[in-house]
Image (cartoon, rainbow, N blue to C red):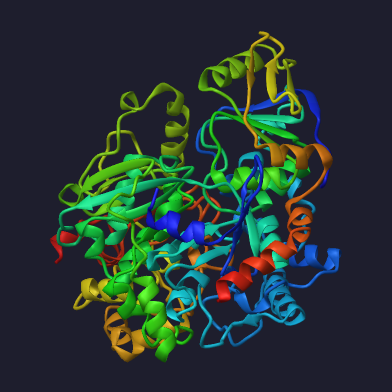
Amino acid sequence: MNTLFDKIWDAHVVQNVQDGPTQLYIDRLYCHEVTSPQAFAGLKDRDIKCFRPEKIFCMPDHNTPTHDQDKPIEDPISKVQVDTLERNAKDFGLKHFGMMDTKNGIIHVVGPERGLTLPGMTIVCGDSHTSTHGALGAVAFGIGTSEVEMVMASQCILQSRPKSMHIVVKGKLGEGVTAKDLALYMMSKMTTSGATGYFVEYAGEAVSALSMEGRLTLCNLSIEMGARGGMVAPDEVTFEYIKGREYAPKGDEWEKALAYWKTLKSGNDAVFDKEVIFDAADIEPMITYGTNPGMGMGITAHIPTLESINEAAQASFKKSLDYMGFQPGEALLGKKIDYVFLGACTNGRIEDFRKFASMVKGHKKADHVVAWLVPGSWMVDAQIRKEGIDKVLEEAGFAIRQPGCSACLAMNDDKVPAGKYAVSTSNRNFEGRQGPGSRTLLASPLVAAAAAITGVVTDPRELL
Amino acid sequence: MKQKFDIITSTCIPLPLENVDTDQIIPARFLKATTKEGFGENLFRDWRYDKQGNKIESFVLNDPTYSGQILVAGKNFGSGSSREHAAWAIAGFGFRVVVSSFFADIHKNNELNNFVLPVVVSEAFLAELFDSIFKDPKTVVEVNLPQQTITNKATGKNETFEINAYKKHCLMNGLDDIDFLLENKDKIVAWEKKHEA
């Protein structure tokens, strides 16, 4: 009780349905092209409009190619889906940031950077990584398409109240250890279902010390522990980040909003359903070895042995390692890799490009490595160029592609071929996630950069 | 898709793997459709077919030994992506019930919103059910929504399962959440008025 989550949730309750879910008011609905067409079709079937069109923002990101975006999409099915979103947005009177619009990008990168995501809001999107927006102190969670249709129709959703979890990370993260490593570490300890049914608030010295970009990465990955969402209480870092952004409140409205946002924190008497404590000093740069994001380890560690896995999970564990082509008990350092992907709603922000560039500066990309560097939005792309990061990357043999979800889920042409290993800053290493047969090693931008220049799995601390 | 739900009595298809994610249930490259139809054909696509499109005979959906309207799966079913296409694929293939000891939150809602019933059972019940099905693929399970019970007819073991009264009413009467929300517009407007002030 009296947690940050409770304060925001309670403020948005329209009614508690008897012996049922809560009817929750939603401040912001984001729509991308993959999970919205059937919701729009549902509205058309019922012959109804969007109830509050001004609260809905649409943009394509999953299918968008990462080159030649000024030309029509070559894949005809992708093109239909992207065109359908544009037409639906027009038909229903919704804001739409189309391809090549300077406001376009991955929806979870664009929302915060345009000031559309604000503290205290309830935010949903037909996308599990909607948890990202919790970094600004919002209650944000992913939903299915039927639920998207609900929000379009009524600006409300029916949802059971999740339990609350407090994850406190004490101490300071070491050199070369990033928000991504922190998240991968937590998943490795909690498993991919350890936070299912919960809404997480992250706190503690290591979390407070994170930049906004770092917090966005951390909250983004909440769903990979099964959590409904994750959030960080807004503070000066948050306010500084939001101030002056396009859709952020201005003038008197800003002062009024700020006064409210400053009340958004868990009370000293807050009671969480579950408390978990981690020590930042225990965390080293992380890498995954299996086919779910909970199958991660410190980069210098060894894959668990079969005997160390409980019996019911052994079949899945064996299937996973067979798919990856790894042996139980072996180390990954020095393993040859084929692809590197920097990007996604997890690590496609300016700070991620700064980190990657700082590591590859003065080095050359390994000849055999194919590297895809994909900014999360055109705004990130512009900042990369403004800071001269593009020059550093070019000198090291890297090219920057155009924004979108890209190889995170390979709905466009950026597919890792079967059997090839990709060190990827994205969020999921599921079988076939980056293309049929692809083998994904999830890691931070620093680990990805180190692998890109050495061509093998490398501890980035050795190059710092 | 609004099929009224009452009692389902059926044989089962067993999938004793844990952490089955929605990328496996329906891979991303099949998410490009703009309707809800046809996803059943690609349910578990990359486990069902090889790269050349040939059936992988050893996969349970291709094994004629097993059939039925009930999918029985390992712990943490439906993790990962929120794609409702996974629920459309499960429903499209002909499943009415998914039994597991644990479901991921978003996918569980997606199943319910498509009149597929996720039934959470204990680990012991699940282990025994897998055992029964492997011993006798003709093992029948009864899922009784009005009573909220699931019975393994081979052993007679039964358990009660949870579902909130509202959602149970919706499933049994073929109603969806949008019907409910549209009837409650006045409450929404009242909430907005209160919060504009």
In x, y percent, where is residue A217? 36, 63
* Residue A78: quadrant of the picture: bottom right
Count up the numbered dots.
0
Q: Is residue B27 above or below residue A343?
A: above
Q: Is residue A249 visible?
A: yes
In x, y percent, where is residue A438? 48, 53
In x, y percent, where is residue B25? 62, 44
Q: Is residue B30 left or right of residue A211?
A: right
In x, y percent, where is residue A280? 19, 52
Q: Quadrant of the C terminus of chain A?
A: bottom left
Q: Report the residue that reaches farthest toward the top.
A: B155
Q: Nearer the viewer, residue A234 or A39?
A: A234
Q: Residue at x 77, y 44 (%)?
A: B92
* Residue B148: quadrant of the picture: top right
Q: Residue at x 29, y 88 (%)?
A: A387
Q: Is residue A356 left or right of residue A60?
A: left
Q: Is residue A180 left or right of residue A146?
A: left
Q: Is residue A380 visible?
A: no
Q: Is residue A451 left or right of residue B91?
A: left
Q: Residue at x 64, y 62 (%)?
A: A156
Q: Nearer the viewer, residue B88 or B125?
A: B125
* Residue A33: quadrant of the picture: bottom right
